[in-house]
Amino acid sequence: METRTRMPNQHGLVVLFGSGEIAPSGRKVHDWVMRQLPPPIRVAILETPAGFQPNSELVAGKMADFLSRRLQNYDPQVTVIAARKRGTPFSPDAPEIVAPLLQANYIFWGPGSPTYAVRQLEGSLAWH
């Protein structure tokens, strides 16, 4: 099994899903990415892309459950980041909300609107 160790100032992998992130083919992609990371695998799932939806917590929770159950052989430590919307208690500028991002080595921007996510995250504490 091949693994990679990142050097300081080296950026990580970026994977784009159009859909199917919890389909069998999506599971294979998550599996491949997790094999590239040194343990422990610390996953941060951003609710932001679906933050305008009343069920964004459910959407992100479904992804967290998928990663925890379907990729349990990696023992991922999964945290949902409820950075839904600026100017609310769930702001991407709230240090207590976005703190788990600092420890994550796997960040997943969930399903939803990429445009909404960029508007909410651009220049935010979560972005930095």
Image (tube, rainbow, N blue to C red):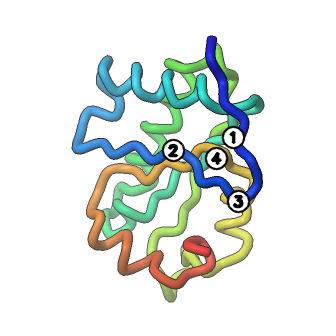
Frontmost of labels 1 and 4 is 1
Q: Residue at x 36, y 80 (%)?
A: 119
Describe the element under mark 1 as helix, strand or loop: strand
Residue nearest the observer in this picture, 62 or 125: 125
Label 2 secondary element:
loop
Residue 42 disc label: 1
Q: Position of residue 127 (x, y in %)?
A: 55, 73
Name the side, left or right, on which 26 lies relative to 89: left
The residue identified by callout 2 is 13
The residue sitting at 54% across, 62% down in the picture is 82
What whole-number distance in Å separates the C-alpha atoms at marks 2 and 3? Answer: 13 Å
Label whose residue precedes the other's in the sequence (2 or 1): 2
Q: Depth check: give the residue in front, 12 or 67.
A: 12
- Name the kind of residue labelled 1 in the image: Arg
In the image, residue 119 above or below residue 74: below
Q: Which residue is mark 4?
A: 79
Does 30 appear above or below 24? below
Element marked by disc 4: strand
How packed is label 4: few (under 14 Cα within 10 Å), some, or many (20 or more)?
some
- Residue at left offset 42%, top offset 78%: 120
Give the number of the disc on residue 9: 3
**What's the distance in space between the residues labelled 1 and 4, CA to CA?**
8 Å
Q: Is residue 58 left or right of residue 107?
A: left
Mark 1 / mark 4, whichever is N-terminal: 1
Q: Secondary structure at mark 3?
A: loop
Q: Nearer the viewer, mark 3 or mark 4?
A: 3
